[in-house]
């Protein structure tokens, strides 16, 4: 990408407004009970907000490919950490007893 | 090659060919630091995922005791501080010094408002635990924890203590990042005011911006996970 990529202020204001709207959305949806989907909806909104921040406020969209590799590997290792931990815990009896 | 001009830029460190290479290197370094930070917080998020899946009722009860209105307002404050930080970086890239300083100070102000609100939120949970009792409303995990305030009894009360351990741990680590970030922003604002940065060289402003936005992203996840569990 170009050395002096200056993002127009309009983009920042647009992202800010989108983040505000999504914050209202994430609160508003708690008025409805989607059962097990409550968490999925909440995380979906949060991931959308985080993506906007990374792409525009943090300029990832205008950064070299190597930055994208670091971001992707960061997410990948986070998913490994949480997902593999959960597979272990949910597949064992709980609470753990001293008798074993 | 334009080495004759760029090589003499006072900000150019000798191991780099030119300012562009230096900028790419330091920016990548910051991203690697942030990737490490994701895993630093990741341990707490993993613990949260495990315990929430085990004790959904206690987590819901704990979450309902927090004020979503305060969390909501603080989320907007923090998003606002990310906007002012993005503006500071923007004006640094086009060399408008006074606006860089102004927006950096606005970011510090909004960050301080966030921490001030957090101070009162913590106070409400910690104050009842002090003194000789009866500790009504004490929400610090431990002997004085008041499970009755959450309408819980027996083992559920213990599970709620796990929720509040994670609440204090996760929001505390987040707040610590802000407490570290604020003096760094102030230092960079001071240097910006003295004319240390230019459109060619303003990496410190960009890097502290990346850090601040990362801290914002952590809160974007903490808010729904801690304040908004279950239907309200």
Image (cartoon, coloured by chain):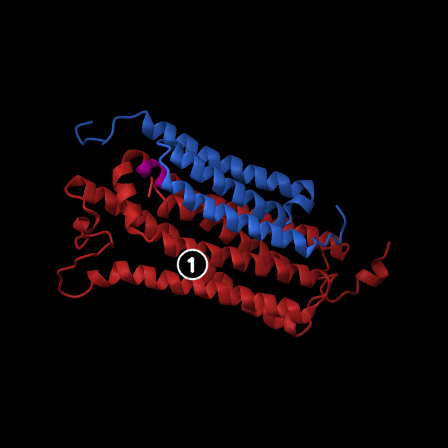
Chain colours: A blue, B red
- What is the x, y in percent for residue B171? 38, 53
Q: Nearer the viewer, residue A40 or A18?
A: A18
User: Local crowd at mark 1 within 10 Å, few (<14), some, or many (≥20)?
Assistant: few
Please tell me whether residue B111 is drawn above or below residue A72 in the rendered image: below
Res A35 seen here: yes
- What is the x, y in percent for residue B91? 68, 63
Please tell me whether residue B222 is drawn above or below residue B189 in the rendered image: above
- What is the x, y in percent for residue B153? 15, 43
At 77% from the left and 65% from the top, the residue drawn is: B9
At 50% from the left and 36% from the top, the residue drawn is: A77
On the image, numbered disc 1 is attached to which residue?
A: B176
Res B202 seen here: no
At 41% from the left and 41% from the top, the residue drawn is: A29
Please tell me whether residue B92 is drawn above or below residue B211 in the rendered image: below
For the C terminus of chain B, the image quarter is top left
Residue segment shown in magenta: B48-52
Q: Which of B76 and B226 is in front in this view?
A: B76
> In this rendering, would B150 be left or right of B79?
left
């Amino acid at each position: 990408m170009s050395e002096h990529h200056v993002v127009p202020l309009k983009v920042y204001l647009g992202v800010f407004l989108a983040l505000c709207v999504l914050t209202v959305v994430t609160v508003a949806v708690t008025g409805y009970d989607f059962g097990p989907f409550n968490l999925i909806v909440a995380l979906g909104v949060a991931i959308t907000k985080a993506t906007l921040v990374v792409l525009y406020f943090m300029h990832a969209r205008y950064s070299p490919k190597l930055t994208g590799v670091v971001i992707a590997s960061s997410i990948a290792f986070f998913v490994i950490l949480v997902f593999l931990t959960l597979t272990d815990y949910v597949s064992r009896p709980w609470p753990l007893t001293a008798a074993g | 090659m334009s080495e004759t001009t760029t090589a003499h830029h006072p900000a150019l460190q000798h191991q780099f060919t030119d300012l562009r290479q230096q900028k790419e290197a330091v920016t990548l370094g910051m991203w690697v630091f942030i990737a490490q930070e994701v895993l630093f917080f990741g341990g707490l998020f993993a613990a949260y995922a495990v315990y929430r899946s085990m004790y959904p009722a206690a987590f819901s009860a704990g979450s309902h005791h927090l004020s979503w209105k305060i969390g909501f307002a603080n989320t907007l404050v923090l998003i606002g501080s990310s906007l002012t930080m993005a503006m500071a970086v923007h004006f640094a890239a086009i060399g408008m010094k006074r606006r860089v300083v102004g927006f950096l100070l606005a970011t510090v102000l909004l960050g301080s408002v966030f921490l001030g609100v957090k101070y009162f939120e913590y106070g409400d949970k910690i104050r009842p635990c002090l003194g000789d009792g009866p500790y009504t409303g004490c929400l610090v995990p431990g002997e004085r924890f008041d499970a009755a305030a959450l309408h819980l009894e027996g083992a559920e009360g213990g599970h709620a203590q796990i929720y509040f351990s994670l609440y204090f741990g996760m929001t505390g680590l987040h707040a610590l990042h802000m407490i570290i970030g604020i003096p760094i922003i102030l230092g960079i604002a001071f240097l910006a005011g003295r004319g240390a940065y230019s459109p060619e060289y303003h990496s410190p402003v960009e890097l502290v911006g990346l850090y601040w936005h990362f801290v914002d992203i952590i809160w974007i996840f903490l808010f729904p996970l801690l304040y908004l569990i279950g239907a309200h």
